[in-house]
Amino acid sequence: MTNASPLNINLIQEELSKGEFTNLKKMFNGIPPYDIAILLESSSPNNRAIIWQLIDENLEGEILSNLSDEVREMILSFMDASEVAEVTKDLEPDEIADILQDLPETVTAEVLDAMTDQNRQLVKKVLDYPENSAGGLMNTDLILVRPNHTLEVVLRYLRLKKNIPESTDNVFVVSKTNKFRGSLPLSKILTNSPQSLVKDLMKDELNSININTDSSEVIRIFEKNDLISAPVTDDENNLIGRITFDDVIDEIKSEADESLRQISGIDSDTFEKTSTAIKTRGFWLGTNLVTALIAASVINIFKDTLEQVIFLAVLMPIIASMGGVAATQTLTITVRGLALGQIVKANYLYLFNRELIVGISNGFFWAVILSLIACMWFQDWLLAWVICLSMIINLTAGVLSGMGIPILLRSLKLDPAVAGSVIVTTVTDVVGFFSFLGLASYFYS
């Protein structure tokens, strides 16, 4: 068995249900740590505890680094501080820091105490910075050379090191006081004369990333420049560490996971405990109930009109639904544009005008269609006018709120992906019901 394909996962789950643990330990031989991490995430909490006891200790550190935050936190609860220190000793400092951030502060302190002095200092450097910053993403495994070194000296230095850090495409050039001066690609070292000087071949543009840069901006920098690695410097241009593309990929996955969890109100662990699922989903259901009550209170204002013209109740959900779809379309485009850094103050007016035209145009077109259907259905031309006007109003309100609300939330330093959909849905429901029933009250009074 060499990988944890869906079929192998099924077989393992069957063995667990039978209690055949001896066979399971044999089955784990040769499975890469990444696949064992997938297996753990595909198992129930009880089975995870069993699987963890059967895994080779030499693989535990790498498996922990590949687990999602929620599952890793659960696995760490099975371990004491000395065990965590032992299994993580060969990991990169940023990977160890990610693991320690899932532990209580008191346990983190114990793990740090149990580490070697060298590892402790390296990990503390990363822990000093927020998880979603360049400092939190960086590694401290640097290869440093000086501008006046020859390539012969650099090559001799690399041979003495024996092991070059993974994802190394450049060595970094610093002054005697550790000021970042530039990067020297490995390709330059291999293809130029050994007597050439580093300063003549290095890329001397200071394309470093400040240590406080937000992780989203780090992702954009890597995407824009097609980077494999990038140096990280502090405000005084001291070289502190480097970020590699695998760290960026992990951060992209983490951000996507977090956005999905926040928008849907669910935990990203598929097999989370029932009690946890009740709490996390219950909050968002309660939020939805509040917004539904607001919409219901608008309907209640026009209860006399509904009693007088009963078929309004049949068409009312259509108006709100059309506005909701239009708002969601604009909301998705706007949130994506904000996330990619494409929407800025300079192009707000263009987008606002475009969305206004889109809302009015679609509102008018579909209003005419629905008005004709309603007229033929209920034989009432007055109703057709009510539908036409309210549809235009709600689709226009929908696209404007779909753009305006995310931008407002971003200006207030709130995540538009979290609250945007809830607020926009409430707006379109309230505007849809109020415009439809308000116009009906006016025309039928």
Image (cartoon, rainbow, N blue to C red):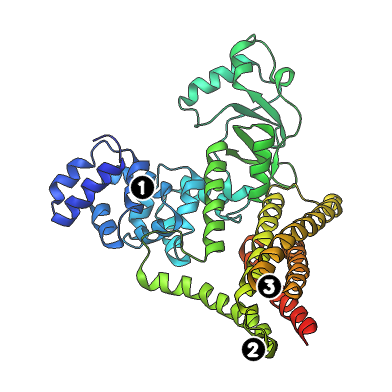
Whether residue 414 is visible: no
Closest to the camera, between mark 1 and mark 2, is 2
The label on residue 432 is none
The secondary structure type at the circle numbered 2 is helix
The residue under label 3 is 379
Q: Residues within 10 Å of mark 2 (few under 14, many from 20)?
A: few
Question: Number of callouts in the render?
Answer: 3
The residue under label 1 is 37
> Which of marks 2 and 1 precedes in the sequence?
1
Closest to the camera, between mark 1 and mark 3, is 3
Q: Where residue 105 sits: x, y (%)? A: 48, 65
Q: Where residue 21 sits: x, y (%)? A: 15, 51
Front residue of 360/2: it is: 360
Q: Is residue 94 left or right of residue 55?
A: right
Q: Residues within 10 Å of mark 3 (few under 14, many from 20)?
A: few
Q: Is residue 263 left or right of residue 371?
A: left
Q: CA distance from mark 1 to mark 2?
A: 60 Å
Front residue of 261/241: it is: 261
Which amino acid, by three-letter code, is at mark 3? Gln
Q: Residues within 10 Å of mark 1 (few under 14, many from 20)?
A: many
The residue under label 2 is 307
Give above or below for 249 relative to 394: above
Give above or below for 310 relative to 219: below
Furthest-bottom residue in this view: 304
Which amino acid, by three-letter code, is at mark 1? Ala
Closest to the camera, between mark 3 and mark 2, is 3
The quadrant in which residue 197 appears is top right
Q: Is residue 258 left or right of residue 427?
A: left
Q: Where residue 12 sits: x, y (%)? A: 22, 48
Which residue is rendered at x = 68% and y = 72% of the image?
379
Which residue is rendered at x = 55% and y = 63% of the image?
262
